[in-house]
Amino acid sequence: MHAPVTGPVFAIYYPIFAAIAVPANLVAIVILFRGRCGLSRCITQYLLSMAVTDLLVVVTAVIFNRIRGIYFPVTFLTTTPGCSTSAILTYAARDSSVWLTVAFTFDRCVAICCRKLKTKYCTEKTAVLIIGTVCMLSCAKNVPCYFIYEPLFMINNVPWYCSMKPIFYTSVGWAAFDWLDRILTPCVPFVLILLLNALTIRHILAASKARRRLRAHRNGEFHSDPEMESRKKSIVLLLSISGSFILFWMTYVINLLYVRFTKGNYFAGSDFNDPRFILQESGYMLQLLSCCTNTCIYAGTQSKFREELKNAVKYPLALITKFIK
């Protein structure tokens, strides 16, 4: 976990980001929990878990790390044990969010491409099991992160701040751990999401052509097909979530490849004139931004979610109006 930057841009950006992302994810959680969006229980469980982990990323990475570092530079979380623990929580929430996106993509791929497996795999029980497994593995994977850091300085025998140990960049063991961490998040998810989406799109296009030919042959003309309309809505939701993930993580991936292949290190300063700093912070900012886009995606692709969102906005306004009268 790099030191929080304190430039004027970030002092404004992160509070605004948190003020938008936290309510957006909370609203998404409430709406999905109510289960009135016309989605199956299986899909709802995945979307709900993604909204929860996105919210945890905002709380741990943005509020506890960035905003706290800018406005409250001296707290318990500033001590080395505190910021090391915060790092584990942040990385665990991040990994859970990423791999739940992969799990959701795989679930939709199975539902669309494997009809026989769908009845056994695409169930609420399986979804809950997958979600629980992903979250537990994400937490276990990041426990070693606690031992990456050393104090920046000591005051009255109290270790303050977190700095990556020099051995992290030279040790074969730590290099292997860092490569494994970067490969598992987000490189492997990148590849899996692209492959699963390609397979799903290919299957949908082939099925669409076959159904159009069959319906045209039977009826002599084209009619609306409810099943294909449902598939189109599912694929729009799937591609929107997967595409935003790839888009927002791309800069982060470029930065980590740059660090490793040039044998450099992760930038720890706040030099706005340094291209490396701009690249690194842009990657972090876009990565965090991906945690508040899913609500917009739900609203843009699901009509019933938009209706529930409108009701959620109207309800407090109605209460205020009633109270004034």
Image: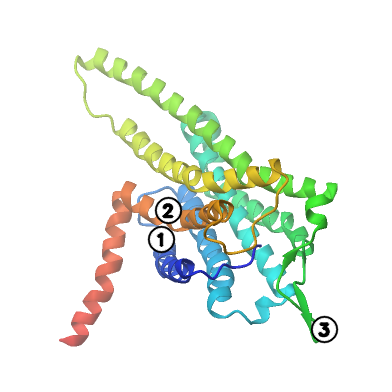
Nearer the viewer's eye, disc 3 or disc 2?
A: 3
| 166 left or right, relative to 24 | right
Which colour style is shown?
Answer: rainbow
Q: Amino acid at mark 3?
A: Asn
Q: Position of residue 122 (x, y in %)?
A: 52, 41
Q: Is residue 104 above or below residue 312?
A: above
Q: Is residue 161 above or below residue 167?
A: below
Question: Which residue is labeled 3 in the image?
Answer: 157
- Furthest toward the front, the residue is 273
For residue 223, which quarter of the picture? top left
Instruction: Check disc 2: other Cα within 10 Å, few if <14, some if 14-19, many if 20+.
Output: many
User: Of marks 2 and 1, which one's residue comes earlier in the chain?
Assistant: 1
Q: Residue at x 59, y 68 (%)?
A: 4
Determine which of the numbered discs, if any, sits on residue 28 in the image.
1
Q: Is residue 209 above or below residue 59?
A: above
- Secondary structure beneath label 2: helix
Determine which of the numbered discs, if any, sits on residue 294 in the image.
2
- Secondary structure beneath label 1: helix
